[in-house]
Each structure stands twice: as structure tokens, then as C-alpha cells.
Amino acid sequence: MCMGRGGRVAEGRDSAYSGGFKMTATIAPRPSFPHRHLLGIEGLSPLDITALLDMADEAVEVSRQVEKKRTTLRGRTQINLFFEPSTRTQSSFEIAGKRLGADVMNMSVASSSVKKGETLIDTAATLNAMRPDIIVVRHHAAGAVHLLARKVDCAVINAGDGAHEHPTQALLDALTIRRNKGRIEGLIVAICGDVLHSRVARSNIILLQALGARVRCVGPSTLLPAGIERFGVEVYTDMRRGLADADIVMMLRLQRERMNGSFVPSVKEYFRYFGLDREKLSYAKPDALVMHPGPMNRGVEIDSEVADGAQSLIREQVEMGVAVRMATLEALARNLPNG
Amino acid sequence: MNSPTTSEARPLVFTNARLVDPASGREAPGAMLVQNGAIADIAWDEPVRPGPAEAEVVDCGGLVLAPGLVDMRAFVGEPGAEHRETLKTASEAAAAGGVTTVVCMPDTDPVVDEPSIVDFLLRRARDTAIVNIHPAAALTKGLEGREMTEFGLLMEAGAVAFTDGARSVTNAQVMRRALTYARDFGALILHHTEDPDLVGSGVMNEGELATRLGLPGVPREAEIIMLERDLRLVRLTGARYHAAMVSCATSVALIERAKAEGLPVTCGVSINNLTLNETDIGDYRTFLKLSPPLRSEEDRLAVVDALARGVIDVVVSDHNPQDVETKRLPFAEAADGAVGLETMLSAGLRLVHAGHISLAGLFAAMASRPAALLGLPAGRLAVGAPADLILLDPDEPYVLDKANLHSRSKNTPFDEARLEGRVLKTFVAGRKVHDISLAS
């Protein structure tokens, strides 16, 4: 089980990273990915992360060709098990699996027996009996994917569990940053908005720090989790100060039910103080780049002008998502029996 | 199940014992005679004293002979949830753990809020249980926190205390009236102090670890605010009040101040909060999902220290059997609670072995003080006291295997834990109800 406390040992591993994406073709024996599942960024070494990013760089090239189909996962069965509705993550995993030649089956909660009272464990046991090779799971409860991983024989990828982790999102964000800035080490990354409920924020904090970035969390105190400063991040409740000299501005989605009085008083007030518009963005470095895991609430946490502007990487993040998921599927498939 | 027939039982003579009497704090070698279900004679500093010729002799071999434990807080599934626990299985777990008196909580189905249900429990216990069972009755009807129950009639029926179990009475007016009315009867109120609104969706201690696990947290203030309110109401009403389980340093300080002021206040702590902390949750282990939640190591050390100083009066098992259906779930969706009757003494001995508290001090918190609070004659080694006794090897090491637990539910936080100190024999009213050498 990859749940150690070893996620933040960035020092001394930078040489493994300095190869960057341009050199991957010349690295002869790829470092293996020594994990059976991908349940979180926590527990991955910087070397593991870099290996995945390097593979993802190659997957980007594959996806940009006319002939995108590979045979890496031919004969393998991939089940996308989504207990929470998702459009982009689920389709991203589906496309990634298909490009690698896997047989992909989507199972979402609305059409499943979970609604009839079947437990998570029973669902896991049922699917396991169908002999899949990889299960991709999203669940609304933190730790649910870990629980499921203990009950199946195949590889498990966490596609988001509650407010815990969303590792492939953090990997795709890191890939996007690395391809645009050429590095991650030393960059100032401001993660802004609803950090409290965000698995994207947690995975990103751990990953970016492991690769040597300076991470800030920016948001109203009602949306910052207890003990967040113990993660080694800088905490700001003033957006302009939090964005000062930032290289990357990473916005988080604010869910509708949290907008009206429970965590912030109103959309209007939230946008005024924490919505990313050109004026606030001007406090970041002139070449700062803007990211958002999607789906965006335009006019709530981000202004359309910024979302669609020249500094935005939001579309590229989606492309990188497919590449990172291809890399993850391939890395885990190599560790499967007879793989 | 054969009920205790004390009048016919042979007298018992314990020889070569290390007698531990928490009521007096006395600890010395000695011998003891038990007759008619009660302690008939104690020979302090005499390893052997001959008893009647027909007596059965138990050579204690220098091991500890002490009063059986009195557990003020156990949830038993009967009536309504017999698939998790019955009075019979709970009492067998208790006997194996050295607990000879169990106070069962009223949040059963139906709720213990009427004298007839107290009567049912006592009769059921008489017929099926092998240790003493004393029901605690509901503080409010249906545990709804709105109308108080019939304290007088319930006490006449045999209720030893009043509590809404794992629920807090949030309405201060209701609590004030209940405390005021309880004072007239000298009734003991046990209160779970957690503000449900501040708990919200929280499932573990609020802080860095909860944030890392992506789980919503329970702030200490949920407990502290409710406790502070209660202490003000006790000052107003003068009722006997017992905070069921404190879990953090601030609560300890509040209790200490209230006692210094002379308020009729006592408090308990769960064995879990004394011996585990939030990091034991590890990889989402639902058997460690508890209410109050496991706190930080600093808080744990604060409650251990408070226990050693007597600020915390009582240690409870907070025995709460849960089955696979309620525990084998994602952490936030799993039920609260852990079984504890069978392990509370072994776990508590960790504090003795670590030098935090004396053996007599531990037995005071687990036997004599709860007995005194409840007005029961148990929990002490004295002539005339009931012969509720345990023979304990305080040093025997073992690894707990949950499959061996007597409780019908196996949700122990100590599965595969290395424990030191084991109950070898348990006697209730002079009758042997547990013998480890006969267990499988």
C-alpha cells in the first residue's frame, strides 16, 4: 500500500528530474514504477513522479499523430467505476485506455446496483470476479479507493476520492507546467480558492513540493483546512498578496452549494475578493500562467477574459490529462502479471 | 445459562495472592475467604489462612487478586440490535476482560425510557448474563432532548444513572430542568459532551492529519463548549453531573477548575482516548472511528496525566459493538464505536507498565470510583463486599486476535496489538464466570 509519509523528499533527487521531456528519448532503461496501484501522490518518490511525467511526454506525441492507437494494453480490460458524476476525467481515462488498446468499460453509479443498496465492497468483489486488469475509481468518500484496492486483485487508479487525492490531476498539472516553464523546481505556485474541499489542491501541494516548487494556498479562511500550514505551504487570505510574483496561478472550483452563506456570503463577494480577473492577475509575474482543473464557474472563481486569455493553460491541461492517464495506465500495466 | 446460586456455592479460599484494594489504596500479599457470594475474611500480609474444610482453595501463585471492574459505559444491542450484541455475549466479553459490573446505555430499540424496559433488562440479565448488569436510563424521552424521563420511577425500577448515551442535550433549558429535577432524587446525570452542530460532518480530530486524509474534522471546541455550558448549569442547579468522556487538555482544565470550586462534578475518559491517538487511524481504519474522536498525542498525554492526578475519576470501555455492515465502509460513512469490555484492562495496563499510574490507581478508576459514583457496593476488597473478583497476571504478554473475542462484534482497535497483562479468572458473587485455562 503506498501510503507512506515519503512524498516530500525533494532534495537530492533533482538530477533525476533534470532530464526534462526533451531528453526522454535518449534515456535507455526507463526507471520502473514500483507500485501496484496509483492511490495518491503521497507515497510516490520524486523519481516515480518524474518517470510518469517522462512517459506522459511520449504519450503526448502519440496522441498528436494521426494513428493514435497503440497495443500496450491489448487484451487488457479497464473498468472506469465512477460513483460521482464526471465528464472530463471519465472520458479522459476512456480515451487514454482506448489509445493504448485496452477494452474499456464505463460504469457509473446512476446505472449500477449501488443505488439498490449494494455496498462498495460487494461492488468491488463483483467487478473483481470479472477479471479486469485495471479499475479506475472515483468516489465521494475519502479513503474509499484505498478500501476498494484492498479487495481486488487488479491495479487500481484513484480518479478522485472525497477531499483526499486526485493524483492524475496533479500529474497532468505538473506536466503542463513542466512543458511550459521547462522546470518545476523553484517556481512559485499559488493554489487559490476552495482548498478545504479540494482533492486537487492536496495532490498538487504534495507533488509540487516534492519536485521543489514553492506552494502557496490563497483563499478565505473558511475555505482553508485546519493545519494546512503544516504542509509547508505559505498561506494567504489576501489574493493580491498571495499572487505577488507567482509563476503559476492555479484556480480551484467553488461548488454551488458552498457559495451562498455557508462558507462565503455570496458569489458577488467571493468574486470581488477571490475571483481571478486581469487586475488581480497583474500582481503575479508578467509571464505567469493560469490553470484550472475544470469545470470552471465563469464569473465565480475566474473571469472569462482570463480563462480564455493568452496566459491561460486550461485547454492544454485537458490534452495533458489524456497523456498522463496513458502514462499511468502503461506504468501500472507493466507491473501486472504477465505484463 | 445457570443463574448464580450463591447460597449453594462452596466457600472459596484464595491463597498466595497479591491483594490490590483500590478503595483503600492498599496493596500487599494475603489470603481471602469468600462465603455466600461475599468476602467473608481478608488476611492482609498472611499468604495462607485456613478456611472451612469444605472450601475450594485457589492458589493465586503471587498473582494479583483485585475487585472486578465496574464499567460505566457499554452499549449492548439488546433489545433491538441483538445481531451486534446481547446481554449474554456482552457479559461473556466482560467476564473475559475482568469486568464484573456493566452499566448498559439506553439507546436501544426501544429506548430505555420507561420503567418497564428497565425491568425487562434486569430480568433478561438475570436469566442470561454472567456478570452484574445495571441499566442507565434515558435522560430525555426517546433520547430526543426535549422532555425529561421519569427519574424517580426509573430509579425505583433499578436505573443507576441517566444519560442520552452518545447524544448531547443541545437545548440548555431542557438540560437545566433535568439537572434541577435530578437533584431532588440525587440522580446521577452522565452526559456526552459534543455540540452536534460543531461536529457537523466531522469524523476525526480536526487538524493536519484530517486534512491530509481529506476527512472533515471535529474541533475540540465541540466538546469544550458543551462542557463549559454544562458546568455553568451545574453551578446553577447543584445537581450531580458526570461528563461521560473527556478527550482533550482543555476539558481536563475545565473539570479541574470546577472541582476546585467544589461543584459536584466528575468525569470519565474512554480507554481508547487514553491509549490511542489520531495517527492510529492510519490508512482509514474504521475501527478507530470513535466519538469523541481520537485526539493528538499531546491530548492523550494530558488525559493520562489527569487520570494519574485523579482529575479524571473513571475509565470506561465505551464498548460499542458494530458489525461488518456498519464498519466495512469508507471511513466517513462507517459507524462510530469500538468494542472494549474485553480489552480495557489489558490496554489500561499499558499505562501501568509505562509508569504513568499505579496498579491500584488504575483499579480505582476502573472499579472503586465508578462503584462509589453509582452507589454500588462493588469495587473494593472489604469484608461484606460482594465477591466480584479477578485473578490477574499483570505481566503476561499476548497478541490480541479479534477472532478470539467473546463479543458478538469484532470491531476492536487493538486487533493484532501486543498487550501485557491478562485476566486469568473472574468471579461474580463468588461464582467463577471465566477461567482462561478452560477457554479454547
Image (cartoon, coloured by chain):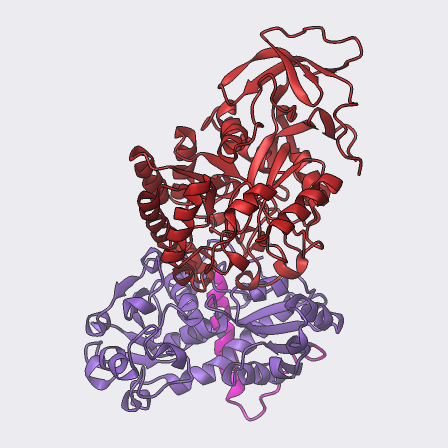
Q: Residue A177 vs residue A115: left or right?
A: left
Q: Is residue A73 shown in magenta? A: yes
Residue at the outermost bottom position: A66
Does residue B168 appear in the picture of this structure?
Answer: yes
Residue range (magenta): A47-76
Q: Residue B354 vs residue A211: left or right?
A: right
**Quadrant that contains the C terminus of chain B:** top right
Q: Colour of chain B?
A: red
Q: Judging from the image, what is the letter of the chain drawn in purple? A: A
- Where residue B18 appears, as percent x and y from the top left, is 60, 15
- Residue B348 drawn above or below residue B295: above
Which of the pair A15/A220 is nearer the observer? A220
Does residue A26 appear in the picture of this structure?
Answer: no
Instruction: Give the residue displayed 34% in from the left and 76% down from the top.
Output: A250
- Residue A212 drawn above or below residue A111: above
- Where residue B433 appears, as percent x and y from the top left, is 73, 31
- Residue A257 drawn above or below residue B84: below
- Where residue A161 appears, as percent x and y from the top left, is 52, 69
Q: Residue B335 vs residue B199: left or right?
A: right
Q: Is residue B235 shown in magenta? A: no
Which of the pair B362/B418 is nearer the observer? B362
Which of the pair A6/B217 is nearer the observer? B217
Instruction: Give the residue displayed 56% in from the left and 27% down from the top.
Output: B379
